[in-house]
Amino acid sequence: MRILGIESSCDETAAAVVEDGVSILSSVVASQLATHARYGGVVPELASREHLRAIVPVVRLALDESKSTYADLSAIAVTAGPGLVGSLLVGLTFAKSLSFARGIPLIGVNHIEGHVHAVVLEAKQRGTPVEFPALALIVSGGHTHLFETRADFTYRLLGKTRDDAAGEAFDKVAKLLGFGYPGGPVIDLLAPYGNSRAVPFTLAKMKGNALDFSFSGLKTAVLRWTQARDLAGEIQKRKKLLADHPRPTAEQWLAITPQETLDLLASFQGTVIQELLRRAAAAAECMGARSLIISGGVACNSGLRAAAIARHLPYPVHFPSPALSTDNAAMIAAAAFPKLARGEFADLSLAASASLPLA
Ligand code: KG4
Ligand code: ZN
């Protein structure tokens, strides 16, 4: 059974064809990074316009690469939320139109559930399926959530960020220091050259639900650190480097970045990793998890991967491959497969929802 997945919740227009919830026959992602980079973040109006431009060729390419015709599709799965409403509407309207015109069943998918399925799908492909109940830590530019995930893909929210998402904190800190957008990959690249104990950031203490996250205090501490120094010269050099080279190498960054700034990046990243892992481990223990899933753009972070392994947790930890960590449509098609089996179809009233809850 082949499902066409369509994803347009943020700044990637993606389409994929997945067979039987496990074989990725095609996965096409059109990134808008170049459009948003100069603004230091995603500009919603520009994102909607880019989705409109990309949606037809992206879906066509996904069908061509999978050697599928519309007649081969058992369903069309589309992200209904959470995300930017203008962006969601492009994928959703396209999917509904296709479903109506071709008589193909429509399935609405929650974007966060997609990130969970990126891991479930690859674990199945490796022959080591995820054991349930699992604790899912979804960390991206828009989300930092802990979900108890059961074998029937029902969910219970155990904790979430009260302010910034972890990826957002990476992006804001990078922007503050002139490292461009997105910030996660650059900080990940440079953190190994700094001392993660050099700047002693305090960990967030949460009143109420101890499994909630907060990154705004850390962001403010980084702001204070920068205000206490004269960084104008080094920030200027980095902006110039970015103008000449859209994606500088580690060597190029290192040549214009003092050790003190590298130490700050390492300490910031180390603190985010500690915040994520200590709460994930506490949540996993509290629900009796048999595995830990870490997914979303920040799951690409090599420091996070190394730290999760170094913890020697008493259950397996599953990360997606880098291609399935950031937004893609294969995860949306995979998430729709159990819904297809259960006959959970949507009709044309399916609406885009900026804050669609999962649990
Ligand atoms: O899942 P994603 O593609 O989009 C959202 O749903 O938000 O995640 C993008 C986020 C950005 O904030 C980006 O800075 C972060 O993931 N990210 C990383 C890394 N690669 C991407 N954060 C830390 N380390 C990385 N290697
Ligand atoms: Zn995402």
Image (tube, rainbow, N blue to C red):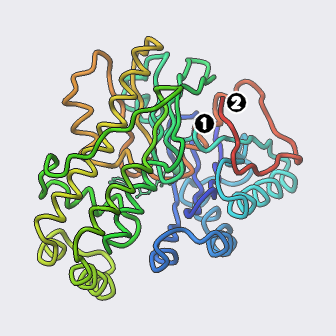
Residue pointed to by mark 2: 339
Query: Compared with residue 302, is residue 245 higher up or lower down, i.e. above or below?
Result: below
Measured as percent of width and height from the top left, residue 124 is found at 44, 28
Residue at 63 percent of width and 75 percent of height: 46
Residue at 32 percent of width and 62 percent of height: 224
Residue at 49 percent of width and 16 percent of height: 133
Front-most of 299 and 343? 299
Asked whether mark 1 lies closer than 8 Å to ligand 2, one says no
Measured as percent of width and height from the top left, residue 335 is found at 60, 36
Q: Count every numbered label the image shows and give the total.
A: 2
Residue farthest toward the front in the current orientation of the protein: 228
Please tell me in which quarter of the rendered image ligand 1 is found.
Answer: bottom left
* Amino acid on which disc 2 is placed: Lys
Query: Compared with residue 174, is residue 320 higher up or lower down, i.e. above or below?
Result: above
Q: CA distance from mark 2 to mark 1?
A: 8 Å
SS of the residue under disc 2: helix
Would you identify the image quadrant in which residue 238 lies?
bottom left
Crowdedness near tag 2: few (<14), some (14–19) or many (≥20) residues, C-alpha within 10 Å? some
Residue pointed to by mark 1: 335
* Amino acid on which disc 1 is placed: Ala
Front-most of 316 and 168? 168
Query: Pointers 2 and 1 in contact (CB under 8 A)?
Result: yes
Would you identify the image quadrant in which residue 270 lies?
top left
Q: Locate the C terminus and report the quarter of the image it occupies.
A: top right
For residue 225, side relative to residue 128 (left or right): left
Query: Compared with residue 271, is residue 117 higher up or lower down, i.e. above or below?
Result: above
